Amino acid sequence: MMDALSVVSQLRDLASEPQNREVIVQDQGCLPGLVLFLDHKDPEVIFATLQTLRYLAELSPNIPTMRNELGMMVSLENLIHREELSVDITALAQEVFGILNAHVNPVLRTHEGERRKKPQFFINSSNKKSKSVTLHIQGLDSTDQRGLCEEALLKVRGVISFTFQMASKRCTVRIRSDLPTESLASAIAATKVLSAQQVVKNDTGEEVLIPLNTSGVKVQQNSTLPEYLPEEEESPEREVDRAISRTTAKQDSSGSWLNAAASFLSKTFYW
């Protein structure tokens, strides 16, 4: 049975794959539903929605459609000014708002363009307390290997949450801003069967893999495992693979997960 968090989490995982971003924005139900999710009472749903929008905005042709979606800019602005929300949510709302708004304001466009040229792939890079990094994990071929990776990441002090995109051997990890990325690579290398490289974007916007030094890196471990890690079932391999394969055949949408999610978004959540 679908619920708000599972739907938006799977949409976020789909949006993390560049080939899915156009079809998600073009779907008549997804964007209106995501706007509704921006007003959800659960902060986790709001944050996952902002992450989804941030991914979708990576595809420049999507931006005018997103900006002109009814309620989008107003909802983002409201999030920016809500004092009870976490720094994570406020910072990410500001980033998404700035990207969408930059394309209608020449002055902001110049500033935003300079900022986005930095070789990074942090969803909420302006947040001073945490950051997100994307890792390409060699050897991540099955659920057994994913289990090994989960155990390794759970032991690292400073890891907040993580999600997997098994089809592309990717893992997006949210960590404290003072935790070196090399610590993640060292913990993963300790499994003896997995190795990690960081995924970043170069000046031309292309994704590149950066080797991470693991020799001599000390990893601070948790004495007890956090109860909130990992984020459950956010990127099940079968669901992601099925949804991605459907994006290349838009006419066959009656049974697609994306169509079902869009219907759920648009018909169920009117808070």
Image (cartoon, grey):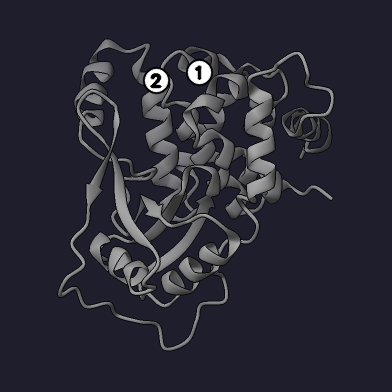
Picture layout, residue 153 above or below residue 134? below
Residue at 37% of width from left, 35% of height from top? 95
As drawn, is 232 to the left or to the right of 132? right
Residue at 50% of width from left, 81% of height from top? 225
Can residue 59 be seen here? The reply is yes
Residue at 24% of width from left, 63% of height from top? 182
Residue 173 percent location from the top left of the image: 42, 56
Picture layout, residue 206 above or below residue 170? above
Residue located beneath label 1 in the image: 67
Residue located beneath label 2 in the image: 101
Residue at 41% of width from left, 17% of height from top? 60
Residue 14 percent location from the top left of the image: 58, 36
Q: Residues within 10 Å of mark 1 (few under 14, many from 20)?
A: some
Check contact, mark 2 vs mark 1: CB within 8 A. Answer: yes
Q: How many marks?
A: 2
Question: Of callouts 2 and 1, which one flags the residue occurring earlier in the amino acid sequence?
Answer: 1
Can residue 39 be seen here? The reply is no
- Residue type marked 1: Arg
Q: Picture quarter containing residue 8?
A: top right
Residue 131 percent location from the top left of the image: 34, 53
Name of the residue lying farthest toward the left: 216
Q: Secondary structure at mark 1?
A: helix
Q: Secondary structure at mark 2?
A: helix
- Residue type marked 2: Asn
Q: Nearer the viewer, residue 1 or 187?
A: 187
Residue 177 percent location from the top left of the image: 28, 60
Q: Nearer the viewer, residue 225 or 165?
A: 165
Picture layout, residue 87 above or below residue 35? below
